[in-house]
Amino acid sequence: MPNELPLNLLISWALFFAFFNVHMKHSSNFQGASQKMEVALMLSTLLGSLTFFGLLIYYFLNVSWYWPFVIFIFGGFVGVTVTKIFLSICNAIQEVILNDNEDDPSIGFLALTFISFLGWPLSSYWVFTVIDGIQT
C-alpha cells in the first residue's frame, strides 16, 4: 500500500470541501422564495455528501489507513478558510460591479452558491483522478 499524500490532492480536496461547504451552509440557512433553488441545494448537498464519503473510502482503499483521516481533518480546517476567501472575493466583486458599499453579503454568497454548482463536481473529479493516479 502506498504511503502518499500528494500536494495536488490537498489542493483539490480543499477546493472540493470549500465548494461543498458553501452548499451545506446555504442549504441549512436557505431563506429564499424559490422552492426550486432549495430543492437544487438539497440535492446538491445529498450528492456532495455521497461523493465526499465515496472519495474518502476510495482513498482509504488505495493508501495507508491513516491518510483519509488526515485529509478529512485538513479539509475541515483549510476548506472552511478557502470558503471564507471565496466569499470575500465575491463580496469585493459585488462592491466593484454594483458600486454597492453596503455590507450585504447575500449577493456574494448567492454568486458563490451558483459557482459551487460547478465547483464541487469539478473539484471532486480532480480529487478522483489524483487518487486514481496513486500507484497501488
Image: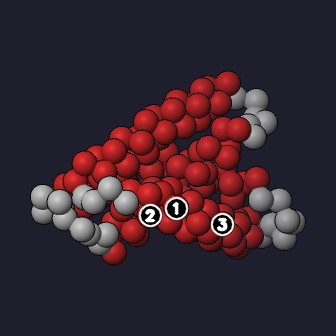
Relative height, residue 112 to residue 26 (above, below): below
- Residue 50 at x, y = what percent? 43, 36
Label pair 2/1, CB-CB below 8 angstroms: yes
- Kindly report which numbered mark, 3 or 2, lies closer to the viewer in this rendering: 2
| Quadrant location of the C terminus in the rendered image | bottom left
Residue type marked 1: Ile
Label pair 3/2, CB-CB below 8 angstroms: no
- Kindly report which numbered mark, 1 or 3, lies closer to the viewer in this rendering: 1
* Res. 91 image quadrant: bottom right
- Residue 74 at x, y = what percent? 50, 66
Left-right relation of 34 to 16 = right
**Viewer-closest of 82 and 52:** 52
**Viewer-closest of 4 and 51:** 4
Compare marks 1 and 3 and give the one earlier in the sequence: 1
- SS type, badge 2: helix
- Pointer 2 residue: 70
- Residue 78 at x, y = what percent? 55, 68
Residue type marked 2: Val
Left-right relation of 32 to 101 = left
Relative height, residue 12 to residue 32 (above, below): below
Circle 3 Cα neighbour tier, 10 Å, few/some/many (<14 / 14–19 / ≥20): some
The residue lying at 70 percent from left, 38 percent from top is 28
- Pointer 1 residue: 73
Q: CA distance from mark 3 to mark 2?
A: 21 Å
- SS type, badge 3: helix
- Pointer 3 residue: 84
